[in-house]
């Protein structure tokens, strides 16, 4: 389904303009192209529906972006499997003998997508801290994460970060050079309880913002020094931004220091830390003192 048809079907209003044509062949550029298309559609859904009914706007945005991503991937990457947050049973953990085991677990290429990361922020007028995530996992890989490509579109900010042209490694902030506090990007509505204790331990400053993709983008940009999360996430929440952060040269791992892995039988990936490499030893050591009890 095209952007035009998706928006018209959901809103029943005017159809948005859309750029057609053939997408890039290279996976990383394709990921950027795909995230940008979904982002443009989401901006149009926001404009068409408005903010009076936040629940309806969230649902419309999730569905429109999911339908577009699924349709374009089926058209341009028909042999690849897909894991989307909006798939039926997307959160289930699969066992080897389950007859309903998804094709992605036996595929060599899987697109891991979050059609709309930060639905709360998307539904609030004026907020720009929401994103579209598109990542590619491949079985033929050299890194533990096996993320071969990724793109994070932040449509309301009019920017996209992707692995086709990774951003430069963030410079050492002036605050660090002068002994100022580490800035940790944290959820503005539901920060993990242990993060406050962690911040007090290392003298860090919490910087509240919306979606996981936007938080990791802030670390990539140098607007934050680290992002630490342990409140429960799934693969689609982090795959694309971690792909970009890793391509930039940043540290990305579980909060216990172990590797991030994707396209697992259980898609839950509840915690991670992304930061400048010079901060990783200090943060990981402090995290050991504040790891949440599981």
Image (spheres, rainbow, N blue to C red):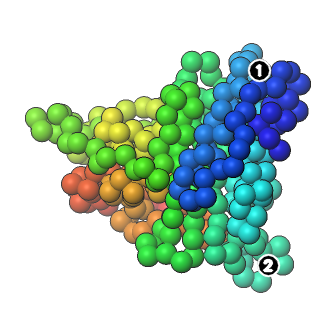
Position of 91 with respect to 168 (left or right) is: right
Residue at 32% across / 50% down in the picture? 275
- Looking at the rendered structure, the secondary structure element under dot 1 is helix
- Looking at the rendered structure, the secondary structure element under dot 2 is loop
For label 2, count other residues whose C-alpha is less than 10 Å away and answer few (under 14), some (14-19) or many (20+): few
- Residue 174 percent location from the top left of the image: 17, 34
For label 1, count other residues whose C-alpha is less than 10 Å away and answer few (under 14), some (14-19) or many (20+): some
Reading the image, the residue beneath label 1 is 48
Which numbered dot is residue 87? Answer: none
Nearest to the observer: residue 261 or residue 165: 165
Q: Nearer the viewer, mark 1 or mark 2?
A: 1
Residue 279 seen in the current view: yes
Residue at 60% across / 53% down in the picture? 24
Position of 236 with respect to 83 (left or right) is: left
Reading the image, the residue beneath label 2 is 98
Residue projecting furthest to the bottom: 97
- Residue 11 percent location from the top left of the image: 84, 26
* Sequence-wise first label, 1 or 2: 1
- Residue 70 percent location from the top left of the image: 76, 52
- Residue 118 percent location from the top left of the image: 59, 37
**How many numbered circles does the render carry?**
2
User: Does residue 125 lie above or below 82 as drawn?
Assistant: above
Nearest to the observer: residue 34 or residue 119: 34
Residue projecting furthest to the front: 21
């Amino acid at each position: 389904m095209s952007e035009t048809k998706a928006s018209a079907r959901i809103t029943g209003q005017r159809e948005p303009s859309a750029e057609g044509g053939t997408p890039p062949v290279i996976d990383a550029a394709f990921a950027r192209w795909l995230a940008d298309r979904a982002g443009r559609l989401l901006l149009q859904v926001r404009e068409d529906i408005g903010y009076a009914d936040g629940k309806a706007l969230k649902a419309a945005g999730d569905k429109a972006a999911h339908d577009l991503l699924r349709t374009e991937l089926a058209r341009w990457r028909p042999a690849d499997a897909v894991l989307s947050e909006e798939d039926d049973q997307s959160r289930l953990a699969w066992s080897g003998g389950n007859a309903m085991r998804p094709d992605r677990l036996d595929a060599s290429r899987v697109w891991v997508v979050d059609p709309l990361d930060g639905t709360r922020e998307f539904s609030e007028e004026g907020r720009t801290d929401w994103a579209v995530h598109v990542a590619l996992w491949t079985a033929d890989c050299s890194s533990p994460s096996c993320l071969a490509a990724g793109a994070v579109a932040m449509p309301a900010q009019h920017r996209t970060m992707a692995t086709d042209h990774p951003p430069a490694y963030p410079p050492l902030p002036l605050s660090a050079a002068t002994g100022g506090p580490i800035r940790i990007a944290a959820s503005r509505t539901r920060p993990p309880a242990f993060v406050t204790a962690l911040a007090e331990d290392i003298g860090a400053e919490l910087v509240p913002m919306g979606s996981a993709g936007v938080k990791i983008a802030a670390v990539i940009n140098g607007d934050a020094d680290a992002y630490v999360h342990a409140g429960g996430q799934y693969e689609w929440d982090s795959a694309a931004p971690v792909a970009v952060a890793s391509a930039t040269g940043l540290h990305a791992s579980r909060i216990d220091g172990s590797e991030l892995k994707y396209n697992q039988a259980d898609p839950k990936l509840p915690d991670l830390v992304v930061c400048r490499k010079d901060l990783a030893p200090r943060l990981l050591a402090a995290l050991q003192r504040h790891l949440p009890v599981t």
